[in-house]
């Protein structure tokens, strides 16, 4: 069976993928990044750990702004 070749600009492909439902976006990522499941597990683990550290310090991670979260993570990394 002959392969179909399309000449589509990268920006258009990105926009098409962005327009997909969440499940379809994950399917695209899984096809492009074979180890995506492992990456997701690592992200989930990191998220749980930072929330645990925050809880022990009396900090509500959910209420922090993105900037405050970045500062906190930076601070935690440099405490090491």
Image (cartoon, rainbow, N blue to C red):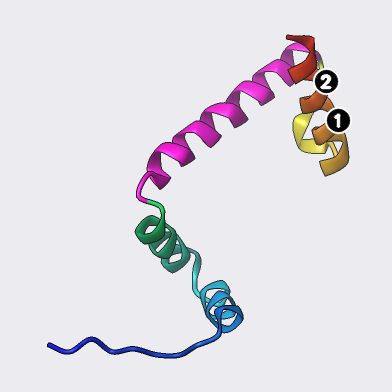
Quadrant (top left/top right/bottom left/bottom right) for the N terminus: bottom left
Q: Nearer the viewer, residue 52 or 3?
A: 3
Taken as a whole, is the magenta stretch helix, strand or loop? helix
Q: Is residue 29 left or right of residue 79?
A: left
Residue 63 at x, y percent in the picture: 82, 37
**Relative height, residue 59 to residue 21 (above, below):** above
Dot 2 corresponds to which residue?
A: 75
Is the C-beta separation of discs 1 and 2 under 8 Å? yes
**What secondary structure is found at the residue carrying circle 1?**
helix
Regarding mark 2 in the picture, which secondary structure is present there? helix
Q: Position of residue 34 (x, y in %)?
A: 35, 50
Give the labeled residue for mark 1.
71
Q: Cα distance, mark 1 to mark 2?
A: 6 Å
Instruction: Let me know if residue 1 is in the magenta part.
Output: no
Q: Residue furthest left?
A: 1
54 left or right, relative to 23: right
Q: Residue at x 55, y 85 (%)?
A: 9
Q: Is residue 68 above or below residue 50?
A: below
Give coordinates of residue 18: x percent, y percent.
57, 72
Q: Is residue 2 above or below residue 54?
A: below
| Crowd around label 2: few <14 · some 14–19 · many ≥20 (10 Å) | few
Write down the quadrant of residue 73 in the picture: top right
**Residue 80 marker:** none
Number of marks: 2
- Residue at 81% from the left image edge and 35% from the top image edge: 70
Q: Is residue 54 magenta?
A: yes
Bounds of the magenta span? 34-57
């Amino acid at each position: 069976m002959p392969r179909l070749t399309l000449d589509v600009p990268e920006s258009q492909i990105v926009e098409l993928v962005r327009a997909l439902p969440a499940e379809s976006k994950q399917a695209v990522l899984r096809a492009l990044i074979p180890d995506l499941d492992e990456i997701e597990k690592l992200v989930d683990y990191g998220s749980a750990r930072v929330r645990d550290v925050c809880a022990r310090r009396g900090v509500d991670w959910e209420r922090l702004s993105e900037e405050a979260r970045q500062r906190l993570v930076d601070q935690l990394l440099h405490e090491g």
